[in-house]
Image: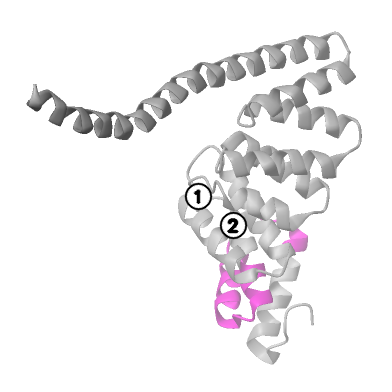
Amino acid sequence: MNRQLLLLPLLTITLAIMAPTALAQSEGMQRAPSSVADGERALSLYHQGRRNIEAGELASASRQFREALSLDPGLMVARRAYARILMSAGRPDRAQGVLTRGLEVKPGDFVTARMLARIARDNNDAAVAIRALESIRPPVDSKDTYLRSHLADLYRRTGQHAKAAEIYAELHKADPSDPAWVLGRATSLDHHGSRQEARELWSSLLERDDIDPQIRNYGEDRVTALRDTQIPYGG
């Protein structure tokens, strides 16, 4: 009997310690179905939105996509569908914001980043386009090589010539047959002030038979300028 009395305080303490854990587990079990339900509801709203797009009801579709994203911010198909509606309504800035938020939720989402880069580039927002492409950077020998060339072009347009030259070098290594990569690197290094390397690249470009006559004439001018007078690019 005395042993039972001694055990009562210990039992009370044990229950007090276990109670918060049990409560947390119970709450977790209650939250999980709610989260699943939200995801299922969001997906259902997305499909409703798709049907409304097919029916030409863009306002209803837009509302359903927004509601879907409020339930599941990571439902990227709904996010991209909503961005397309915004683009069709002439609201590229808003579309960029929707997609940028998506990459915050799911960093490196390839399709979303590619879409954001295209919209931002067409919207003359090179900084956003660059960040989007930098978040994915597919291998140079993949079917998405064009994305790397877009990134190099954006670097060049924003004065980041060393970065542009680096990508063009990678592209040329992966595909030596394309003169565009030599031209891009020559131009970038010329802008960057790397005159010796630029002159060598312009010279190698002139050895090819598959370049445009205007590019050939300009290349000849740059080789002469860089060799004889060291005129800066554009001089």
Q: How far from the left and from the top, in percent, is residue 28? A: 45, 25
The label on residue 181 is 2
Q: Which residues are magenta?
A: 186-215
Q: Taken as a whole, is the magenta stretch helix, strand or loop?
A: helix
Q: How far from the left and from the top, in percent, is residue 141? A: 47, 44
Is 180 magenta? The answer is no
Label 1, on which residue?
Answer: 175
The label on residue 14 is none
Query: With 83 as the anchor, is 28 left or right in this view?
Result: left
Residue type highlighted by circle 1: Asp
Q: Is residue 210 visible?
A: no
Q: Secondary structure at mark 2?
A: helix
Binning the other alpha carbons within 10 Å of mark 2 as few (below 14), some (14 to 19) or many (20 upward) gives: many
Q: Nearer the viewer, residue 229 or 116?
A: 116
Q: Secondary structure at mark 1?
A: loop
* Residue furthest out toward the bottom: 229
Are discs 1 and 2 less than 8 Å apart at CB? yes
Residue type highlighted by circle 2: Trp
Q: Residue at x 61, y 63 (%)?
A: 164
Q: Is residue 81 visible?
A: yes
